[in-house]
Each structure stands twice: as C-alpha cells, then as structure tokens.
Image (cartoon, grey):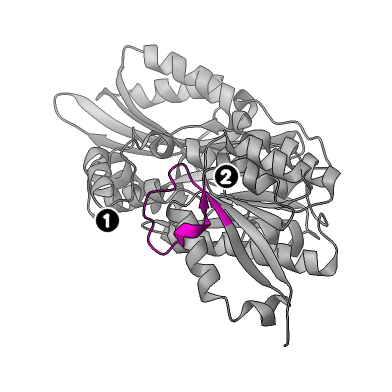
Amino acid sequence: MGNVPVIKAALLGAGTVGGGVCQILEWQKDEMPKKLGASVELKKILVRDTKKEREGIDSSLLTDSWQEILEDPEIQIVIEVMGGIEPARTCILEALRAGKNVVTANKDLLAEYGRELLDTAEDQGVDLMFEAAVAGGIPIIRPLKQCLAANHISEVMGIVNGTTNYILTRMTADHMEFSEALALATELGYAEADPTADIEGHDAARKVAILASIAFNSRVTFQDVYTEGITKITAADIRYAAELNMVIKLLGVARNTEEGIEVGVYPMLIPSDHPLATVNDAFNAVFVHGDAVDDAMFLGRGAGKLPTGSAVAGDIFEIVRDIQAGCTGRINCTCYKNLPVKPKEEMQSRYFLRLHAEDRPGVLAGIASVFGNNNVSIAQVIQKSAAEGTAEMVIITDRVVERHFRDALLIIKEMSIVKEIPSVLRVYGK
C-alpha cells in the first residue's frame, strides 16, 4: 500500500487493561494499514513509576509527565485506562480542549461526569469513545448509538458484573452459601480484595446509568440508579427460585415508561427459559428491546485484559478512520431528551417474599388481607410446614408500585403471627 500515515497516540495507565491494549496494537501492526489506511503508534505511556518493569511494554515510552503528552502536537489520540475520577477527569478534559481525541474505559467517570466530557468533545469537534466502559469486550455502546439508532428502545437490562454472576452461579450449581462462593471467587481472582463495589451492586449501577442514557437518549447518572447487592441472598432463596422454575441473577434493569425512566440494579428471579438465565460464571450479557428490532442480546466476556483491550482498540481504530476521513466529532452526546427518572417509590415490580409465620389456620388469609388493603395482588403461594409450629411461606406478587408493597410489608412485619421475613426479592416480568 506504499507509505501510510502514522497516527500517534498516548496511553494513560499501564496496568492490566493498558497491557492488553499494547498487546493488541502489536498483534494488529501489519493489519492496520489495510484496515484503516493508517497505522497507530504509541508515542508515550503515562505511569506513576517509570522505573518499574512492565512485561510487554517498551520502557523507553514511559513518562510520568502528563504535560509532556498534552503539549505534544503529534499526539492525536489519548487513551485513558487509569480508572478512578481524578486525575482521569482533568486529563481527559485537558486533552479534549487541546483538540485531541480520547478513548476511555472509565465507567466511574462517565456515570457521573459523562455530560461534561461529551459536551467538551462536541465543542472541540473531536471524538470521545468509551466502548470498554460497559461490559468489557462486548460491543454494546456503538450498537446502541448506531446500529439500533432507528429504534425506540423501551428496555435495556443485563448481567454487567462478572464477579456477582460468578458468585450466584456457584451458589446455584454447587449449593453454596454466599460467604463460601465469595471466598472461592476471591481465591480464583474473580473478586477484588475489597469486593464492595461488586457485591453491593455499585459497579453494575454505573454501567446501567451509561446504558440507560444512551438507550433512551436522556441523561441518567449513577445517583439515579436504585441499587441493591447480593449479600443477603441465601441458598434457600435459590432453592425456592428453582422450585418456581427460575434462577436468581443480579440484573441492571432500565425501562422507558410513559411516566419516566425506571432504573435499578438488584438481585431478581428470572424465568429459567429467559436468555439471560443461562448466562453463567463471569460472562456478561445485555438484553435490549426495541420497537423495530424486537429483542436482541449481546453476550461475551465482561472484563479482563484482552476482552477490555479489544473494546479499547476498536475505539482507537474508529477514531483513526474518522481522522483519515476528516470527520472527528461525528457522534458524541446523544442525550437530546430530558426525561424524568422515576423515584424508587413509584417504580413497579413483581416481588418474591419469603417469611416464617405461625403454622395455624387463617395466617395466610390475614397476610393476604394486608396486601389487598394496600393494592398488592398475590399471584402465587408456596407453603411448607417447618418445625415447632412455624410454617415457611413464599409469596409471589403481581406487578405492583413499590410504595404500596413497602407499606404492606411494614404492617406484615409487625403482625404477631409473623416471626421473621428472611428475604424480599424482585421478580422479572410483566
């Protein structure tokens, strides 16, 4: 192809994902001129410690000076894989204002400051791409922005945290309790030393905020997402779910309703025949419903050095094509609507309630009466006798408004016939 242009880039961060990006760019070196009409060359890599040995990374590229990168007119693409809010936010804003295109994998930053970053990119006519911020190697951001742009999307939901999915898979398949499954996930490297962001649902909530913003063309932030984790799930809940022909998954669910956007992350019972029910171990999947496409599902590895590096490198390639065509800044912020986000109390769901009550006639009727008085309809009941005059009961409700269910629950908790309510979970479905 003769001489092809060389696009210079800088990498901010040389950790797991940064190493993956370097590896993939090296693998693709001979292919890039044919794929892109140009090649990409890393000119600088920003790190805290330039003396530290990093396998597979050319130490001559290392620098601890951000200004050196910012002030280099040759560098047209900045790739941020440091994570965290600062200094990533400042670096990205300064890079965009300097007319540089940016690729980021930073979900924390986008879920809170996405509007500021995207508006800045738009003002400067440069690209800001973030495919790797949600679901690792699975293409979902670009499909929502481009391939599915001709749809009104009414729902986007998914399993977007591999750690919690692995834990729930082990609890289901191996009949483990939560603490055992978490210990195994930590031992195998699926869970961080501090797993709070994963097991409490915060990581998934950031990703769902980004997905909802793009799917519904209206800004949703991390603070908007009602979040519950999986720490209270027990082996008993999973057994009852199986009896109901369901499985329990930590789902991020966003719905675009006539009254506003409903968005939350919580463990849910989902029918065993739903495509998401069979997504196991550390895999992620995102399920989208649009008026034209109907249902579509995106499945793959949601984290890891090479899967996440794949998404970052794909964004780099897209920016190179835009640079070559002179059309950077083509697609940035797509949030042109200003839809309300429903408060938690007004959201609607079906519920799974497991309780221990006195084992005598009239108990179920008394509980059903409280639900009925609070506009909660019961769809299904499983009742089992337990020891010493106590019955274990599982109640599945029809779809109800959250505040009506919570009002009923407060009364039921105070009833003398009710001894304990070990579990309250949501159930996916109409």
Residue farthest bottom in this picture: 1
Question: Residue 77 placed where, x, y %?
Answer: 68, 56
Q: Is residue 384 left or right of residue 77?
A: left
Decide: few, some or many residues near mark 2? Use Cα within 10 Å; few <14, some 14-19, many ≥20: many
Question: Residue 42 placed where, x, y %?
Answer: 59, 62
Question: Residue 149 placed where, x, y %?
Answer: 78, 59
Which residue has dot 1 on it? Answer: 173
Q: Quadrant of residue 290?
A: bottom right
Q: CA distance from mark 2 to mark 1?
A: 33 Å
At a point 46% along the width and 63% down the height, the residue shown is: 306
Q: Quadrant of the N terminus?
A: bottom right
Instruction: Give the number of the mark in front: 2 or 1.
Output: 2
Mark 1 element type: helix
| Secondary structure mostly seen in the magenta stretch | loop
- Give whichever of 381, 76 is nearer the camera: 76
At a point 55% along the width and 28% down the height, the residue shown is: 376
- Give whichever of 378, 20 is nearer the camera: 20
At a point 42% along the width and 47% down the height, the residue shown is: 249
- The circle on residue 106 is 2
At a point 57% along the width and 45% down the height, the residue shown is: 106
Nearest to N terminus: mark 2 or mark 1: 2
Q: Is residue 404 above or below residue 100?
A: above
Type of the residue with mark 1: Ala
Q: Quadrant of residue 209?
A: top right
Read off the magenta span.
44-63
